[in-house]
Image (cartoon, helix red, strand yellow):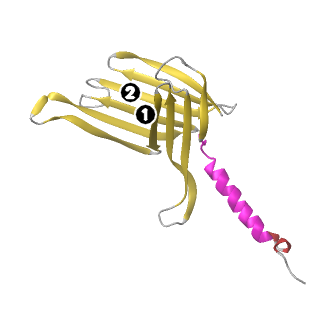
Amino acid sequence: MKRGLISHPLPWLVVLAVSIATQVAAQDKPDFSGHWVLESGSQSAADVPEALEVSQSLVRTNVYGQPMPPFFKDITVVRAFENGARSETYQIGVEGGTVSGGTAERADQPRSQYHYHVAWESETLVMEFGSYTGPAPESGQWTERREEWLLDPGGRLRVAITTRSSSAASSTVTQVYRRR
C-alpha cells in the first residue's frame, strides 16, 4: 500500500507549528505597513501629510542565513503633502547623530549638532529628532521633535507629534490615519 503525505501528518504539523510561531513572534510589535489616509488632525496645515505609504522590513535570518526570532529592522515612510511627497527610512533600534558647521578657524560660527533615536516603547514606535548649537542637547538654539506611532483598538494609525524648541512653547498634535 502506498503511503501519501497525508498518512504522516506529524511533519506537516511541525512545519505548521514553526510557521505559526514565527508569525506570532513577528507580531510582537505592530506592523504599520500599508497605505494610510488622514482621517482627523490638522488637515489644512501644509506640513501635515494627507497620506502615508509605510513599509517595514522584517528580518528572519542572521547574516549567516540562520533562522532567528523575527524583528522589524527598519521603517520607510513616504509622506504625501499637497505640494509633493517626501520619503524617509529609519533604522529601528538605532541612535546616532552628526556635527556640522563651525571650524577651529571660525570659532564665532556655532556648530550644529543633530541627533536621532528610533526605538520601540512597548507597542509604540518612537522616533526622536533634534538639533542644537550648544554643548549638549537643549542648549544654544535647539529644536526637538518626537513622533509616537501606535495602532488604536479600531486599527487606525495614531501619530502624536510633540515639538519643542528654544524659541517656542512645546506643542503636541495627533493625527489619525485610516488604512486604505
Q: Looking at the picture, how far across and down is residue 121, in whole percent?
A: 52, 38
Q: In screen coordinates, is 77 left or right of 168? A: right
Q: Which residues are magenta?
A: 10-32
Query: Contact, CB < 8 Å: mark 1 with mark 2?
Result: yes
Residue 156: give its label.
none
In the picture shown, does residue 75 fall above or below 86? below
Q: Measured from the top left, where is residue 40 in percent x and y?
A: 60, 21
Residue density around tag 2, few if under 14, some if 14–19, many if 20 or more, within 10 Å: many
* Residue in the foreground of this view, choosing between 82 and 46: 82
Which residue is at 52% across, 16% downward?
Answer: 44
Residue, disc 1: 128
Q: Secondary structure at mark 2?
A: strand
Residue type of the residue flagged with mark 1:
Glu
Front residue of 83 and 108: 83
| Residue 177 in the figure: left or right of residue 116 | right
In the displayed structure, does residue 3 sit left or right of residue 109? right
- Residue 14 shown in magenta: yes
- In the image shown, does 177 or 166 lie closer to the viewer? 177
**Mark 1 / mark 2, whichever is N-terminal:** 1
Is 124 covered by the magenta stretch?
no
Instruction: Please state the total of marks drawn on the protein image.
Output: 2
* Mark 2, residue position: 144
Outermost residue on the bottom side: it is 1
- Quadrant that contains the N terminus: bottom right
- Image coords of residue 162 (percent x, y): 46, 24
Amino acid carrying mark 2 in the image: Glu
Mark 1 lies on a secondary structure that is: strand
Residue at 49%, 26% (x, y): give it.
Answer: 161
Image location (x, y in percent) of residue 70: 57, 54
Q: Quadrant of the C terminus?
A: top right
For the residues labelled 1 and 2, the Cα–Cα distance comes to: 7 Å
Rendering quarter of residue 10: bottom right
